[in-house]
Image (cartoon, rainbow, N blue to C red):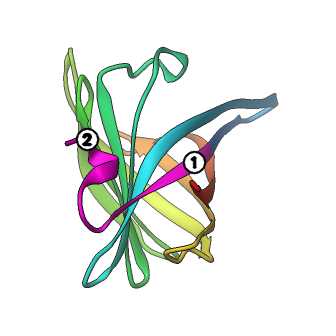
Amino acid sequence: MNAAEQPGKLPVMLSVRGEQYFDGVDPDATELMTEGTLELTEEGLRLSYEESALTGMEGTTTTFEVKGPQVILRRSGAVNSQMVFEEGRQHTSLYETPFGELTVDIQTSRLRHTLSERGGLMEIRYSIAVEHTVTGRNCFKLRVRRKR
């Protein structure tokens, strides 16, 4: 049974746009259109999809877990990480790389979503500091549509 056939997991089409801003440089943007799943949970909902060669994280499953004011981004597989987004707050987490672990501070400036079992939109704007040195500002924009 594949993920889309598991009870409670709804097949969706995801448009994931990631933008990175560095001082004095045009934003670097990647956009991925992919199939994934949307699952309602007791605390909110969970979106999952497989990364591709386009994102440089082939063999990695990405999950956005929406829990009240927080969104937790987990990656597992070839890349393992967890990032917690909560508007107006900073969260620190570990980011595993093939070269070792890094401390990553996430300061979320904006978190908005209209997600439900029908799909919707989510936007997360945040700055990221690696080993306590700010490396840039980022933005995730997700568009979720139920598959027919």
Q: Is residue 70 left or right of residue 26?
A: left
Image position of 121 with respect to 114: above or below: above
Secondary structure beneath label 1: strand
* Quarter of the image where one finds residue 129: top left
Rendering coords of residue 82 (x, y %): 27, 49
Q: Residues within 10 Å of mark 1 (few under 14, many from 20)?
A: some
Mark drawn on residue 119: none
Q: Nearer the viewer, residue 52 or 18?
A: 52
Give percent across and percent down for residue 46: 36, 64
Which residue is depicted at the point 25% across and 41% down?
Answer: 2
* Label 2 or label 1, whichever comes before in sequence order: 2
Tags 2 and 1 touching, CB below 8 Å: no
Q: Which mark is residue 13?
A: 1
Give the structural element (helix, strand or loop) at label 2: loop
Q: Which residues are magenta?
A: 1-15
Spatial separation of the CA atoms under disc 2 and disc 1: 16 Å
**Residue 2 numbered mark, or none:** 2
- Please identify the quarter of the rendering in which residue 90 is found: bottom left
Residue 18 place in picture, x, y as percent: 62, 40
At horizontal 47% and vertical 15% (from top left) the residue drawn is 53
Say which amino acid is labelled 1: Met
Q: How many neighbours does mark 2 have within 10 angstroms: few (below 14), some (14-19), or many (20 or more)?
A: few
Can residue 17 be found in the magenta stretch? no
| Visible residue check, residue 128 | yes
- Is 69 in front, or is 144? 144
The disc labelled 2 sits on which kind of residue? Asn
